[in-house]
């Protein structure tokens, strides 16, 4: 188990937050809470929440703060989060970070660490536009860097691989712009709170993973 338990993974789309979280599952039982994954499930189900989120997600825009914060707040109050959690893709705005702080205070908790996944924009575009995602388990592959053993099939669960609609070139570029404008101010926000640790997310995944384990121990 790690010393740091209440964790936020912060960084641009394509930085490998989801991929390294999946690798972490092998060493830690902390629940992985990806707001993007939750939205994709709700959109597929056609739920009320999914309907509210769909348009934003497909355009690569942010779902309004209050909707995401409420959804994440209820998730954090579930039993399995009592001994720690890994938040992936939340918060994404300063307002969300403030709402998260409130939620944690309400339940007598605080963040232990925010890990900033740093990577260059050109690499992020390459990764996003070549990314393949499993329809069943959500694990990512990549047509260039991490091909599946069998084309179109997930190595882990045998599910079908597809390209997320928001991984098209235009939407990926837009998501990176949204990240720069709305999410990157969180780097200074958490630096001020002495919570930020940076890892080089531009390396092959095994090397970035080693860097991640180092900051967690
Ligand atoms: P991701 O899988 O993290 O790349 O998220 C996919 C999409 O879900 C984003 O482009 C947003 O439309 C939406 N989303 C996920 N997390 C958030 C968040 N914290 N705030 C607003 N929108 C979000």
Image (tube, rainbow, N blue to C red):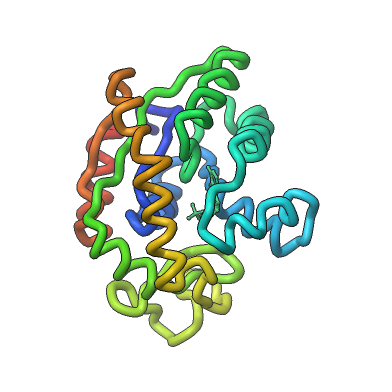
Q: Residue at x 48, y 64 (%)?
A: 139
Left or right? Give the position of 193 relative to 69. Answer: left
Q: Position of residue 100 (x, y in %)?
A: 54, 26
Reply above or below: 44 against 74.
Answer: below
Q: Residue at x 45, y 73 (%)?
A: 168
Q: Position of residue 98 (x, y in %)?
A: 51, 23
Foreground residue among 2 and 208: 208
Q: Residue at x 34, y 26 (%)?
A: 190
Reply above or below: 166 against 106.
Answer: below
Reply above or below: 148 against 139.
Answer: below
Foreground residue among 103 and 177: 177
Left or right? Give the position of 66 relative to 122. Answer: right
Q: Position of residue 29 (x, y in %)?
A: 49, 40
Q: Residue at x 66, y 28 (%)?
A: 77
Reply above or below: 211 against 103.
Answer: below
Quarter where residue 71 is shown? top right
């Amino acid at each position: 188990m790690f010393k740091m338990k209440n964790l936020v993974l912060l960084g641009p789309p394509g930085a490998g937050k989801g991929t390294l979280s999946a690798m972490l599952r092998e060493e830690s039982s902390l629940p992985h809470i990806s707001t993007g994954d939750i939205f994709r499930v709700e959109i597929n189900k056609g739920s009320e929440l999914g309907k509210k989120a769909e348009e934003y997600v497909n355009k690569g825009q942010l779902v309004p703060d209050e909707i995401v914060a409420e959804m994440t707040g209820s998730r954090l109050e579930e039993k399995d989060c009592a001994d720690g959690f890994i938040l992936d893709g939340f918060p994404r705005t300063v307002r969300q970070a403030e709402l998260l702080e409130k939620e944690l205070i309400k339940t007598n908790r605080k963040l232990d660490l925010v890990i900033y996944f740093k990577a260059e924009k050109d690499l992020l575009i390459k990764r996003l536009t070549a990314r393949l995602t499993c329809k069943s388990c959500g694990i990512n592959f990549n047509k260039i860097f991490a091909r599946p053993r069998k084309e179109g099939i997930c190595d882990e669960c045998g599910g079908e691989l597809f390209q997320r609609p928001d991984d098209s070139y235009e939407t990926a570029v837009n998501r990176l712009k949204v990240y720069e404008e709305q999410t990157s101010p969180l780097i200074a926000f958490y630096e001020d709170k002495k919570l930020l640790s940076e890892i080089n997310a531009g390396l092959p995944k095994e090397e970035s993973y080693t860097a991640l384990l180092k900051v967690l121990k």
